[in-house]
Image (cartoon, rainbow, N blue to C red):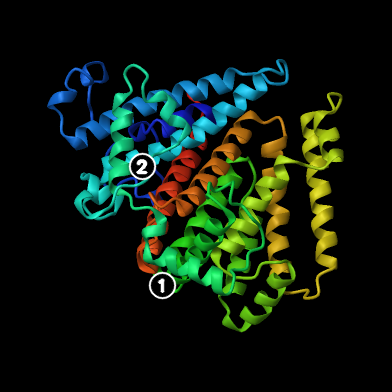
Amino acid sequence: RRRFVDFKSAVANGEVTHVVWCSRCGGGGGRGPLRAALPLGSAMDRAAQLGPQQLATMGLDSLDQALHCWEQALQQLRPEEDPAAGALAASLQSLLADGRRLHSQGRLLAEEGTIEAALLLPPPTEAPPGPASTADTESFVSAEGTSDVGVLSELELSTVPPADQCALYREALELLAREGIPCRSDRAEVVRCSSKQDYLAKIHCIRLAFKRLTGQPEVLQWLIDAANHVLGGFMLCAGKDPKDALHAYRELVAYLLDSSHHDQVALELRNKGVVCPTVYDVVIDYVLLDAFEDLGSPPQPVVAVIQNRWLTAGFKETALSAAIWSLFKAKKRLLPFSGGFFAHYYALMEQVVPVLAWGFLGSDVDLKEMCTFFKDEVEALVCDMFDPSRSRYTNVEDLALDILHNSQLHYDRVCQALAGALLPAPP
């Protein structure tokens, strides 16, 4: 396998011409590089002669360089050797997350060709100005050579209406005040909502959007195929045979597509606190975000095994996998429905979780990089859903379109990463 860290930097830098597209991503579909071929050394000298689109592209170039430098700095830090480096590492990780979100916005400018079309919003004259930004990245705008990043920020602020001026969001707030909106977990801080009320109102809107999306057969099939492709690629990159995992996934999908099971599925999910059986509540919140949280704070016995220097890496991986398999087998024995949703779900998790756990907790650097990249992409996608500058809360149709568009962008990035990780190592 090719080292994933080098490829991840190429993807984050927007150097699409240096990576491999898989067939499902449309690699032969005439995609160009995300950045125009502007000589960076002379770009600032010519800024006065460039139009808005060229300035936006220039800003993306500068942000590419910043992301690359921050990634290199993070890789060189050794928090386990220097406790003082821990705070810096945390700050860099936060900065990288913000930078990647801004980079995704810049990609839209480069791909669509016009600022208005890229933001999927009305022209600036029709949209009221948004509030002043308080993003952490603004502290870098005044740095030498990065004034073009400020251009992107100003463009965004001048064209994005606040969520509280959007009809769908206002309706959700009224519903929240009148009846309340049920939710299993409060992730307001994680998704950068201003309050729990803001989070709940947006949750309601996102649920409606996903119901609209899954009600369209072609979109539902794309979601199914995308997850299938990512799952298979992930298992291959981890050096595992994907056959059993893909079989378990297809069995789960077939079970869910049978409408005669829907009432039982809803009952099983309610018993786990999942009140709305939508893609967001089940797949994103319950499955992915919960898994990332659990892997971020593993049980102490697991930590003890992983950190034991006397054990070989192979023994640690085997012990971790055995513990996880035993856990899921015990869970399956306690299920009230032996052939229900959670029986199918646990069968899939038996294949995936050991690989994911070893990726985050083990000593395989390439696998850890890949798992971290996937986690970052999922979390960035979720933040995009809650960000009114990335997802329009005007009506259900607009929000659904934006969520689908953002999902496709992040899916493409994951596909690039999987394809690159599967390349043979250069001689």
Residue 155 found in image quarter: top left
Q: Which residue is mark 2?
A: 105
Residue at (41% x, 72% y) in the render: 216
x and y percentages locating residue 309 in the rendered image: 83, 24
Q: Is residue 275 left or right of residue 404?
A: right
Q: Which mark is residue 204?
A: none
Which amino acid type is shown beneath numbered disc 1?
A: Gln
Furthest residue in direction bottom, as rendered: 260
Q: Nearer the viewer, mark 2 or mark 1?
A: 2
Image position of 369 with respect to 403: above or below: above
Q: Residues within 10 Å of mark 1 (few under 14, many from 20)?
A: few
Residue at (26% x, 20% y) in the render: 40
Q: Which residue is mark 1?
A: 216
Image position of 248 with respect to 66: above or below: below
Q: Is residue 385 left or right of residue 122?
A: right
**Viewer-side residue, 154 vs 403:** 154
**Viewer-side residue, 60 vs 413:** 60
Q: Secondary structure at mark 2?
A: helix
x and y percentages locating residue 318 in the rendered image: 80, 40
Residue at (57% x, 27% y) in the render: 91
Residue 170 found in image quarter: bottom left
| Quadrant of image for the N terminus | top right
Q: Secondary structure at mark 1?
A: loop
